[in-house]
Structures are given as structure tokens and as C-alpha cells.
């Protein structure tokens, strides 16, 4: 059986399903939440910005999701793998995060996306919360 392709709904499901998560909604009526743990963002649905544009039309991408990563090495590993849809822009040089367009999430499996979001949560959660989660899931 083939692995199911990731969808935007999976981002919301996985991010909101992690422990101690707060979901912040924008006041402008758009569906661009920010998911935080302990007041630290780990998944952020961005508004269109001039640093992420279509190279042909010049239009700002309106579906960019920022996902935190554990380290610069992790970021570079994700960005150097041409089989996945992650990218970055000069605006995020030195920032521990990668970008992905919602329209390209299907290039990942749901399991791959789940692991990336879980890792994002782990990178931002307190040591105590991260250790507890890893123990509960028998990953430590």
C-alpha cells in the first residue's frame, strides 16, 4: 500500500496534536495560524511576503509555511535533498527554519511531514517537555 501524500490539514492536525500547544489566529480573518509551545513558534503560516515569489510571474507566494528545525545542519540537510519541497530565502539565512509551500506538501508523505513537525515541536519545547514526549513515544 502506497504512503498517503501529505495535505495542509495534516499540518494542522499534527501541530495541534502535540502537547502544550497554543494556536494563535490572526485578526484579519485569514487562516494563517501560528502554532507555539511554551510561547515559542514551531509552525507558522506566513502571509505573502516579497522574499518568496514566483520566479516567472513575480507574484508573492500566498501559501508558505515556515517550520522550525533543530539546527543549521538539519536545515541544510533538508534544503540539499532535491526530493523534498523545502526551500529558504536570504531573509532566513541563519534562522533555524525551512519554508514549504502548502501546494507542494503532496511531495511529502504524511509520515514524513509528521516527523518534520514533531521535530519542529521538539526543537522549541522545553527540555522537560521534550524528554517526556520522547519517553512516552519510546524514542529516547
Image (cartoon, rainbow, N blue to C red):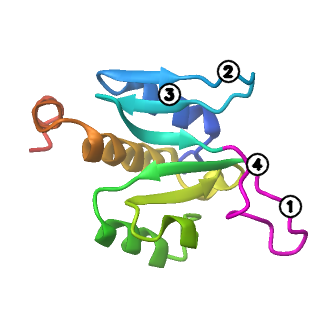
The first of marks 2 and 3 along the sequence is 3
- Side of 31 where 13 appears, left or right: left
Between disc 1 and disc 2, the foreground one is 2
| Alpha-carbon span between mark 1 and mark 2 | 24 Å
Q: Which of 12 and 73 is in front in this view?
A: 73
Disc 2 or disc 3, which is closer to the eye? 2
At numbered mark 4, what does the secondary structure look like: helix, strand or loop?
loop
What residue appears at the point 18 percent right and 31 percent down from the top-left corner? 133
Mark 1 surroundings: few (<14), some (14-19) or many (≥20) residues within 10 A: few
Residue depth check, mark 3 versus mark 4: number of the one nearer the observer: 4
* Spatial CA span between label 2 and label 3: 21 Å
Q: How far apart are marks 3 and 4 (CA)?
A: 21 Å
Residue tagged 1 = 59
Numbered badge on residue 62: 4
* Callout 3 secondary element: helix
Q: Can residue 54 be seen in this view?
A: yes
Residue at 76% from the left image edge and 48% from the top image edge: 62
Estimate the spatial distance between the alpha carbons at disc 1 and disc 4, rounded to whole Å.
9 Å
Which of marks 1 and 3 precedes in the sequence? 3
- Density class for disc 2 (Cα within 10 Å; few <14, some 14-19, many ≥20) is few
Q: 132 or 72: which is nearer to us?
A: 72
Q: Report how many numbered discs are placed on residues in the image.
A: 4
Residue 1 visible in the current orientation: no
Location of residue 27 with respect to 2 vertically, above or below: above
Q: Say whether residue 14 is left or right of residue 50.
A: left
What is the x, y in percent for residue 32? 64, 33
Q: Is residue 130 left or right of residue 55?
A: left
Q: Do the residues labelled 3 and 1 touch (CB within 8 Å)?
A: no
* Labelled disc at residue 13: 3
Relative image position of residue 125 (x, y in whole percent): 24, 37
| Picture quadrant of residue 45 | top right
Magenta-colored span: 47-62
Amino acid at each position: 500500500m502506497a504512503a498517503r501524500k501529505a495535505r495542509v490539514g495534516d499540518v494542522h492536525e499534527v501541530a495541534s496534536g502535540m502537547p502544550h500547544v497554543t494556536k494563535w489566529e490572526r485578526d484579519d480573518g485569514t487562516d494563517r495560524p501560528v502554532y507555539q509551545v511554551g510561547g515559542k513558534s514551531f509552525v507558522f503560516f506566513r502571509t505573502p511576503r516579497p522574499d518568496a515569489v514566483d520566479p516567472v510571474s513575480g507574484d508573492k507566494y500566498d501559501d508558505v509555511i515556515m517550520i522550525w528545525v533543530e539546527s543549521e545542519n538539519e536545515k541544510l540537510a533538508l534544503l540539499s535533498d532535491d526530493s523534498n519541497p523545502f526551500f529558504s530565502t536570504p531573509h532566513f539565512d541563519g534562522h533555524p527554519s525551512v519554508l514549504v509551500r502548502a501546494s507542494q506538501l503532496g511531495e511529502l508523505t504524511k509520515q514524513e511531514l509528521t516527523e518534520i513537525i514533531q521535530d519542529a515541536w521538539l526543537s522549541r519545547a522545553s527540555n522537560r517537555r521534550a524528554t517526556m514526549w520522547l519517553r512516552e513515544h519510546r524514542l529516547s
